[in-house]
Amino acid sequence: MPIPLLDLKQQYATIRDEVLRVTGEVYDSQYFILGPRVDAFERDFAAYCQSRHSVAVSSGTDALLIALMVLGVGPGDEVIVPAYSFFATAGVVDRLGATPVFADIDLADYNLDPKQIETRITSCTKAIMPVHLYGQCAAMDEINRIAAKHNLAVVEDAAQAVGSEYGGRRAGVLGTMAAFSFFPSKNLGAFGDAGAVTCEDDATYEKLIDFRVHGMRPKYYHRYVGGNFRIDALQAAILHVKLPHLEGWTEGRRKNAERYAELFADANLDGRIVLPRELTGRRHIYNQYIIRFADGGTRDGVMNHLKSAGIGCEVYYPLTLPQQECFTDVPSAGDPFPNSDLAAATTLAIPVFPELTKDQMAEVVREIGKALDETRNQKPETRT
Ligand SMILES: *Cc1c(COP(=O)(O)O)cnc(C)c1O
């Protein structure tokens, strides 16, 4: 039986009745944009994130974009972002006419390395945008200390990190604002595109509310140029149904990560594979379970083997952000980012979704072991 990277149908089967009931209510009400269902979801989502406010929006990308718009980021400004992330992290900076300034990551958590930040700060720097990649928070104490010293805003890209914790505090309260994605493959997924911004500050919250509807307050009076960043009532209703299940799903992923650690230890693949590590004081929510190989040849060989064995796996991400064609003209894109390059060339995501069975996980590990033996036999010269 094939093992997918993610199987949302199993999860849906457990909440199907509830989802059909609330979506039926939305259809009957014919009330589709913002409104009480969005308010109710925002209240509970803010509580889940331990934050004072949340503003639900049209996508995770729009959550990042609106956060930067509220900060007034624009032409001439610089925002420091990790060189290794999903495209949107740097894309939103560029779209506002500002310049993304890339900084290398730490391979311990694949997140922005605080030691790489300070040399990149100039008089144009407006914000630092750490990403909690794969579901583990970045080194927020160090990043916030640097931001405070230089009077910079911190926007958490928490798209993959709903429920992730740092020093007992949740993603969403670790910076000035945080952006979440409810893309279906994220731990809390909508039935389409959706996202949210969290913040503590009341004035920031009011601005987010205004920017979501073209900078408008009251109706047809525009103080700012915002956009249409509204979430559908339908998506909010579905997310509201799913939210109480999120902790259980996250615990399922965490248990699976523990089980992988045992299975890989038993498989004796020492030195040939690096497993994800939950760092002290952090709670990893394993939106992705990322393993790293000795070199790119090994990674691609294992990936091909797994795919032909029917095991879902994926490279997140094959290129670093500075390697993207559209960023060729970004000044920092020519700098060396050795850790980001290594991550892009040697990492692989394997299935970790909560419904995965013990047997399936054992099969994944067995096939990776087989693949490693195959690639070793084929290309002994590439071993390091
Ligand atoms: C998913 C993701 C986004 C974008 O979210 P969308 O909802 O797809 O727009 C941004 N940053 C990171 C790190 C992501 O993983």
Image: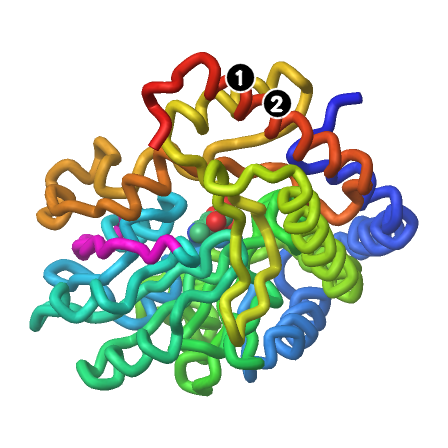
Answer few, some or many: residues within 10 Å of disc 1's Cα (few below 14, many 20 plus, some between 14 and 19): some
- Return the residue at label 2: 370
- Return the residue at label 1: 374
Q: Is residue 135 above or below residue 316?
A: below
Q: Is residue 81 left or right of residue 298?
A: left
**Position in image of residue 90 (x %, y %):** 30, 50
Asked whether mark 2 and ligand 1 are closer than 8 Å, the reply comes as no
Whether residue 297 is visible to the viewer of this picture, yes or no, is: yes
Report which quarter residue 347 is drawn in: top left
Region rendered in magenta = 95-107
**Position in image of residue 369 (x %, y %):** 61, 29
Whether residue 223 is visible to the viewer of this picture, yes or no, is: no
Three-letter code for the amino acid on which mark 1 is drawn:
Glu
Answer few, some or many: residues within 10 Å of disc 2's Cα (few below 14, many 20 plus, some between 14 and 19): some
Q: Is residue 291 above or below residue 187?
A: above
Give the residue drawn at x 48%, y 45%. Answer: 274
Marks 1 and 2: CB-CB under 8 Å?
yes
Q: Is residue 364 left or right of residue 134?
A: right
Which sits in the foreground, 215 or 73?
73
